Structures are given as C-alpha cells and as structure tokens.
Amino acid sequence: MKESLTQSLKRAAQVRANGTATLCGTRRRNWAESVERVARAAAGLRQLGVSEGDRVGILALNSDRYFESYYAVPWAGAIMLPLNTRLTAADLAYMLNDSEALVLCLDEAFIDLLPGLREYCPTLKHVVYLGDGPMPVDGMVGWDDLVARSEPMADAGRSGDDIAGIFYTGGSTGRPKGVMLSHCNLVSNAVNAIYMIGYDASSIFLHAAPMCHLTDGMSTLAITMAAGTHTFIPKFDAQQVLEQIAEHKVTNVTLVPTMIAMMLEVPGIETMPLASLRQFMFGSAPMPHATLKRAVDIWPEMLFLHGWGMTELSPIGTMLPMAMRKQAIAGDRLRSCGQAMPNLEVLVVDSEDREVPRGTTGEIVVRGPTVMQGYWKKPAETAVAMRNGWFHTGDAAVMDEDGYVYIVDRLKDMIISGGENIYSTEVENAISLMPGVAEVAVIGIPDDKWGERVHAIVVPREGAKLTPEAVQAWAREKVAGYKVPRSVVVRPERLPLSGAGKVLKNELRAPYWADRERKI
C-alpha cells in the first residue's frame, strides 16, 4: 500500500469512532462524523467541477472547517493550496494564477479581498465559504451546505508520489515558489512527528499558529494519524492560548518563539494552570536566549522541543530527542535544533558537497522521503536545489560529534521575523521603485521580540530628500505589512560592493550582529 493522507483519517474513524476529533467553539465532532463530512465535502467539490489534480486554494483562519478542507481536497483527488493569511491581495492573486486554482475556500476574514481576486484570477470558478452565518457575498456556496447536499463519495485514492499540496514559500528573486509535496512526503513527515514528538490517541493539540503554515500543518496530519484531538483558535492570542490549554486540557502546542515571548508577558503567567501541557514545541525562527531562559525559569519541568526544517522538507529536518528537552539535562544543547529525523540523512557540506569535519560550518543538505518533489513550474530552480541526490537548504550550520545541529547563519538573504519568511529582494525591489532612491539593501538585524526585524539601508539620488518615515510609507503600499522595514537608515555613502558588483550584505550586517552568538 502506498502512503495516503486520507488513510489516516479513515483509520481514526475506525479505531476511535466516538472519540473527539475536533473542538471548535461550541462545535464538537467525533471521528466518525468528521470522516463522513470530509467524504461529503469532497463530493461537493467534485460537483463544482473539481477533477483529479485540480488545485483548490484555502484562505482562512484556523477552524474545524479548515481541518475538513485539508482532507476533503485530497479525498476528492485534488491538490490543496494553503495560502498564507498575511499576504497582500497581489501575492495571493499571483499564487492562485500560478497554480491555476479552480476553487477557493475562504472565511469572513478575507471577504474584502474577494472582488479583486475574482477580477484578476481568471481560472477561479467557484468560492466556498468556510465562515459562520449566511453567505456575505452572492455567488458563493457554504461549506456546511456543500456537506449537507452531497452524498459521500469514495476516496479518490491518490497516494505515493501523487502531489497532495502546493505550499508557496518565498523565492530568492522575490517571486514565491510553489513547493510540491506528495502524499508520501507528508505522511513520512507525520510518522516522524508521532515518533519524535510523542503523539498518541490521548494527545490534544491546539492549533494556535496559522494552519496555512506547515509548522502547524505537520500536527494536523500527525494528530489525525494518532487519532488524537484537534482544538482551534482562529489566530494566535496569548491569553486565549492559555485559556484553551486550561479549558480543554491541551497536551501539545506548536509556537514560534515570538508567540512564546508574548505568552510570557501575560500577567500572572507564573501561576496559570498548564498541568496538562506536555511540552512546548518551537521553531521557524531563532529563539532569543532571554526568552528561553525566562520560559525555563517559569516552567522548569516543562519539555522544550526545538526543531528545524523547511517547507521543502514537509517540513521537519531535525529535532531534539526526548531526553534533551529539559534544561537541567540538555544544558547548552537545548539551543540546538536537534538531530536528524529518523528517516532522513542530514549532512553539513562545503561548496563541493564534501562533508565538513564536525564543528565546522557548512551548508545543510538533506535526503529522504520527506524531501519535496520540486518547485511548481520551476524546473531550473528545482535543479539548483536538488543536486547529486541531495536537497541543498541554503542554511549554514555546525554539527557536533553526536550529530546535534546548530544553525549559525543563512546562505540565502532570507529574514525570519516572528516565524515569517521574508526575502530581502522582494522588499528591495519595492523600495527601489520609490522616486529619489538610488540604492537599497535590506537585511535582517537582531530583535529581542521578533528574532529578527527587517532593516533597510537606502542611498538617495543626488538632490533627493528621503526620510525613513517616507520609505516605510512607500513600502507599506507595496508589500505585506510584516515585510515593511521596521527601521530605515538613509545614508549618503554608496553601498559596499564586491568585485563582481554585488552588495556586500555581510559587511552591512556585521555591526548589528557583532555581539551576538548567532550570526543570523
């Protein structure tokens, strides 16, 4: 039997038919009900004209309906397209057009974007409403109506190397790249997660991070495979996370370091009841030392699980083993992102793809069943990333004698702020269009709250009068809010260039990172 996302859903209904599958507000559904709704929704998508291999976009906040769509799309034989909820309408339109999406599932939070998406996305034929209440716009069909009016269909049976989802990530040229992940990729990652995180039927997972991100999506699949329970909040809110943990006896949650920092700021956090919580899993961004220290001081018996990965790895590449998740035992290794996942090979190599000695910095390369199938419609970029049978991550790291990996830098000019990947080229392209700008470089600099923040260095044209505020206002109209530089320096000196004419960003970053252990 080949790996299939939907197999685990059917198994959950078989072994825990009456067990709680989803808790969302006042709605509670068991596994038998969930699989029935997924099969009906899949049939409803087929009635809208969705065929095997068609793309179906999902643009919504966290909910049980998002969870159902995550399975209904592959059940119908189609390819899911989870869309980042923080992107601009232009970014979303590009992804929908690039993937040639036929259907878009969205909720009330994104209704205002719909007119523009309909106008600029000619392949988009139907919109399915995942929200509550009556349809806010004519011409939509409600998710619950789709379920109610359709007879359940048999699983389309997609599996193995069939593409299950396209997950867009930033591209070094500023254009997003669609990462094609197969059923085998995602199922293999979920098996790793169950083994390494420790999920079982008693696990109750809180979806607090965006479900559109594979950081959270990994547990969407793994908890289902373990026949555990999913509970949801629409989007991250520190107080609400703590309340949900207490109310639903949540055992597991995955957060980015910024979210953990925000939770530590909640008044009375030291005495709040978190007895059910087994561990905090964090990743997607560097964990500031001060944040980790305070968290350990407040919860000395809590397990802290650090992982590293990329969308292209479905997404986890390394993870701290269970024995190393307490500060008292792990010591400095608590800052490591762990060892290779059970079914992956991870090496640190030089520019000739030769493994470097332990303790030496090089590039992380990975091979194994979780590595992507390639970039959608981008064979050249796929060939660059997949060389000699290994996926080249572009991340620089050190591996110690016991295989623990420490991220020390990134070879690409990607900035990670609050768990979001931001490519400097996209921001530079936007700012370069501003009248009076001669040169611009965008880099990531340290930020105690966000891990990194976007920083722009701008050289004005002769006679031009530029201010940091004006540059930020310009950028705010061109890129998503979280990509707008939080700080800007306007300087008269030209940017430093290499012999090949490239801006020396390492030289620009150096003063900001000089006193930091991690040179991010």
Image: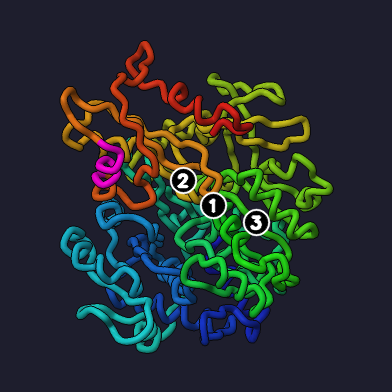
- Occupied quadrant, residue 142: bottom left
Main SS of the magenta segment? helix
Tag 2 and tag 1, C-beta contact below 8 Å: yes
Indicate which disc, 2 or 1, sits on the residue closer to the N terminus.
1
Indicate which disc, 2 or 3, sits on the residue closer to the N terminus.
3
* Rendered-image quadrant of the N terminus: bottom right
Badge nearest the viewer, 3 or 1: 3
Which span is picked out in magenta?
Answer: 467-474
Badge nearest the viewer, 2 or 3: 3
Q: Amino acid at mark 2?
A: Gln
* Rendered-image quadrant of the C terminus: top right
Residue 465 in the figure: left or right of residue 130 = left
**Residue 299 at x, y percent in the picture:** 75, 60
Identify the residue under disc 3. 281
Question: Does the magenta segment cover residue 221?
Answer: no
Indicate which disc, 3 or 1, sits on the residue closer to the N terminus.
1
Inter-mark Cα distance, 2 to 3: 27 Å
Which one is nearer the viewer's eye here, 265 or 76? 265
Element type where label 2 sits in the image = loop
Inter-mark Cα distance, 3 to 1: 21 Å
Q: Amino acid at mark 3?
A: Met
Q: Amino acid at mark 1?
A: Asn
Q: Please rate how many residues cluster around mark 2, counting C-alpha atoms within 10 Å: few if below 14, some from 14 to 19, many from 20.
A: many
Q: Name the residue: 70% across, 58% down.
A: 197
Q: Name the residue: 54% across, 60% down.
A: 216
**Residue 248 at x, y percent in the picture:** 64, 78
Tag 3 and tag 1, C-beta contact below 8 Å: no
Which one is nearer the viewer's eye here, 430 or 467? 467
Identify the residue under disc 1. 185
Q: Is residue 288 above or below residue 32?
A: above
Q: Name the residue: 52% across, 80% down.
A: 24
Question: Does the magenta segment cover residue 472?
Answer: yes
